Amino acid sequence: AKRQKSHYCQFYRADMPVVSGDDLQLETNLRYALERHEFDVYYQPQRVLGRQRSSSVPALSAEALIRWTHPQQGFISPGRFIPLAEETGLIVPIGEWILRQTCTQVKTWQQQGLPPIKVSVNLSSVQLNQPHLPQTIAQILQETGLSPQLLELELTETALMQDATAALAMLSELKTQGLRIAVDDFGTGYSSLSYLKQFPIDTLKIDRCFVNGLTTDAKNQVILTAMIEMAHALDLYVVAEGVETEAELALLQDYQCDSVQGYLLGQPMASKDFYTWCQAMTLE
Ligand code: C2E
Ligand code: CA
Ligand code: CA
Ligand code: CA
């Protein structure tokens, strides 16, 4: 698989262009992608490091990532179509499909004899603004019979802070169902940290721009150490994203990071491959 070139921390700007004219064809294709069954959910494994801080977090965990294969155009990356799906509102049905598909799959794995797997699903700010979101999620959990503790919703800082009051109300309602909330791309989206004490957050996912080149970047070492220490003081679980080398992993272990995700441990994989990966982990 292809490696992306090292990436620097990108900060959010409100005036970022979202949709260009080139996307019109893409939009037409996107409208039919769900009913034509062109989407798939891939699973990227995470590895728990050292001691388990919280016994409520299972040893096996993964992030669910959408994949779109168009019959003519082939693979289209989420980085390209998710912004368009958000702009057009298509993210609502697509997001609901991802949630249902993922919960069904994780429940099936459990029925096939795998230990419980915690799964994180990305949630767009557009979904967060849907008043029906809690009912939708409650219904999916009920339909699939998945334990809510196994489901984590990932939201970026930017999504949370667009309308912080509404987001707080929504997260509080979601939390009553017993699921977990993670802040995605932590450190890149918002300059204030005060939201951390108001929002019912369980996990911080530290953006890969802080992990990239960690071993030679003294500043990133300082930032990561401080982030992890702060997170633990606030009783938050910490996942480092984008771990690509053994040296990065060793440092993160030193820093007491709770869990890691990245190409070193595994690429996002099709459900069959993830099942095999879990079997191997369980036998170890
Ligand atoms: P994200 O949520 O930050 O997801 C992590 C991205 O980093 C994934 O890209 C993953 O394949 C990639 N990645 C994982 N490990 C490494 C590594 O070691 N090095 C590098 N360079 N990259 C790594 P992907 O799957 O292309 O997704 C890109 C973004 O698209 C996601 O960023 C997320 O914002 C969005 N996205 C993906 N799936 C969904 C979804 O189901 N729903 C929503 N709303 N957004 C999604
Ligand atoms: Ca994510
Ligand atoms: Ca992320
Ligand atoms: Ca991202």
Image (spheres, helix red, strand yellow):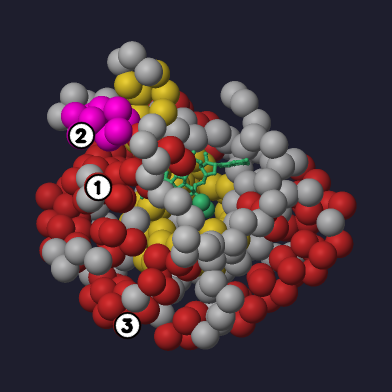
Q: Which residue is mark 2?
A: 31
Badges 3 and 1: C-beta atoms under 8 Å apart?
Answer: no
Residue at x 62% of width, y 56% of height? 10
Question: Tag 3 or tag 2, which sits nearer the N-term?
Answer: 2
Asked if labels 3 and 2 touch by Cβ distance under 8 angstroms, the answer is no
Q: Label 1 to label 2, Cα distance in Å?
A: 9 Å
Q: CA distance from mark 2 to mark 3?
A: 32 Å
Disc ID at residue 48: none
Q: Residue at x 30, y 15 (%)?
A: 71
Instruction: Provide the residue designation for mark 3.
Output: 165
Q: In which image quadrant can residue 5 be found?
A: top right
Q: Which residues are magenta?
A: 24-33
User: Relative to 93, does residue 226 appear above or below in the rendering?
Assistant: below
Q: Which residue is mark 1?
A: 88
Q: Are marks 1 and 2 in contact (CB under 8 Å)?
A: yes
Q: Give x and y (percent) for residue 252.
A: 72, 57
Q: Position of residue 106 (x, y in %)?
A: 31, 43
Q: Of the residues tagged 3 and 1, which is closer to the observer? A: 1
Q: In the rendered image, which quarter is residue 265 located in? A: top right
Q: Position of residue 48 (x, y in %)?
A: 58, 54
What percent of the width, then of the height, locates residue 176? 24, 75
Q: Amino acid at mark 2?
A: Arg
Q: How far is the residue under mark 3 from the one under mark 1?
A: 24 Å
* Mark 3: amino acid: Thr
Q: For numbered disc 2, what is the local secondary structure?
A: helix
Is 197 left, or right, of 172 in this rendering?
right
